[in-house]
Image: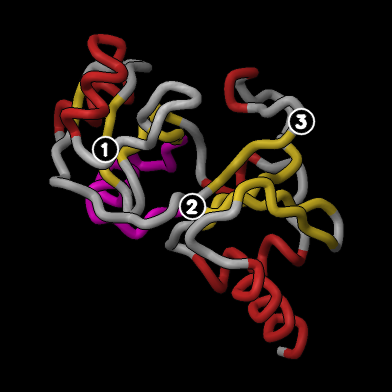
Amino acid sequence: MDDAIVALRAGELVVFPTETFYGIAADTHMAFSVAKEISSVARILAEAFWPGPLTIVLPARAGLPHELIGPDGGVGVRVSPHPIAHALSEGLGRAITATSANRSGEAPATTLRAAREALGDEVKVYLEGGTLHASAPSTVISCNGDGYRIIRAGAITERDIIAALSKGKLE
């Protein structure tokens, strides 16, 4: 863990387990601090599903590294409940940004060996988390204004999202 935190502080990449699949971590700021604005929909969904397998894409704030911003100007944020992900963030003293530990178009890595085979020496530190058994990746949802759009279906269903939003608006 210490080597991983040192690597992140030095701008290096780290592979780590999450509750779904292995991810590649890099240093950034706390989850919502990367957003220009946070809609009430995003806040309700974060409260309902974080930590957990929901990635929320929000309008990126000015000054973020270009590599973190999607083609539509959004930045994805997620809070993983996995103890290693939590320890990385806590040890660094701020949030980490992460993406799946696989090449585009390839299957997500469920073992550290698969991640290492896909990424090789481009990653400074690999953290073992055993074989991960997720049946689905995180759900990716874009939140702008009072609406949302599912970008990628995953572990959290649209029915779950609708239920959380209905409950959140009643309270």
Residue denoted by label 1: 16
In the picture, the quarter occupied by the C terminus is bottom right
Residue denoted by label 3: 73
Residue denoted by label 2: 138
In the picture, the quarter occupied by the N terminus is top left
75 or 112, nearer to the observer = 112
Image: magenta residue range: 79-97
Few, some or many C-alpha atoms within 10 Å of disc 3 (few <14, some 14-19, many ≥20)? few
2 or 116, nearer to the observer = 116
Few, some or many C-alpha atoms within 10 Å of disc 1 (few <14, some 14-19, many ≥20)? many
Asked if the magenta segment contains residue 69, the reply would be no
Kind of residue at badge 1:
Phe
Kind of residue at badge 2:
Ser
Picture coordinates of residue 88 (x, y %)? 28, 41
Question: Is there CB contact under 8 Å for labels 2 and 1?
Answer: no
**Residue depicted at x 30% and y 51%:** 86
For mark 3, give the secondary structure: loop
Query: In the displayed structure, would residue 15 be above or below residue 12?
Result: below
**Residue depicted at x 16% and y 45%:** 129
Picture coordinates of residue 151 (x, y %)? 68, 46
Give residue 107's quadrant in the image.
top left
For mark 2, give the secondary structure: loop
Few, some or many C-alpha atoms within 10 Å of disc 2 (few <14, some 14-19, many ≥20)? many
* Residue extending farthest bottom: 170
Q: CA distance from mark 2 to mark 1?
A: 15 Å
